[in-house]
Image (cartoon, rainbow, N blue to C red):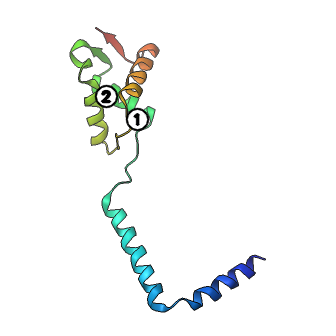
Amino acid sequence: MESRGVKELEKLMSMVPEDVLKEVEEYERSELERHRRSGSKRPFPSNEDVAEAIKEVCGGVITRGNIDSLFDAVKEYLEDQGFDTRFLTEGRFWRLVTSLAKKGVIKVRI
C-alpha cells in the first residue's frame, strides 16, 4: 500500500513544471539560509543553568550589597554564556535562589 502512495506522489511530481520546482527549491534554500544567519536558535537556560549562574555570580553568598542587582547580573551572565533569557522571570529566579539557600548551597547574610 505504501508503494502505491509513492507511485502516486512520483506521478504528481512529474506533472509539476520544472521552473516551478526550481523556484520552490530556491525559496526553501533562501529561507533556510536566512534562519541560519539570524541565530535565533539560542537555547533557553534550564533551572540547572540558572542555579549554576547564581552560584557563579554571587560567589556562594548573598548579601545586602549584591541582592538588589543579582537578577540582572545573573541574566547578563547567562546571555554572555549564549543563552536566550527572554523567559527567565524574576519569580522563577527567586524561587531558585530560595531553593539553593534552603539546601545550603548558597549562604544568605542579610
Mark 2 neighbour density, 10 Å: few (under 14) some (14–19) many (20 or more)? few
110 is higher (above) or lower (below) than 75: above
Image location of residue 40, percent across then percent down? 35, 54
Image location of residue 13, percent across then percent down? 58, 86
- Residue 56 bears which disc, if any? 2
Mark 1, secondary structure of its residue: helix
User: Which of the two discs, 2 and 1, labels the residue nearer the N terminus?
Assistant: 1
52 is higher (above) or lower (below) than 98: below
The foreground one among 6 and 54 is 6
- Type of amino acid under label 1: Asp
Looking at the image, which residue sits at the far top? Answer: 110
Q: Residue at x 33, y 56 (%)?
A: 39
Of circles 2 and 1, the one toward us is: 1
- Type of amino acid under label 2: Glu
Image location of residue 107, percent across then percent down? 35, 13
Mark 1 neighbour density, 10 Å: few (under 14) some (14–19) many (20 or more)? few
45 is higher (above) or lower (below) than 33: above
Q: Which quadrant does the N terminus fall into?
A: bottom right
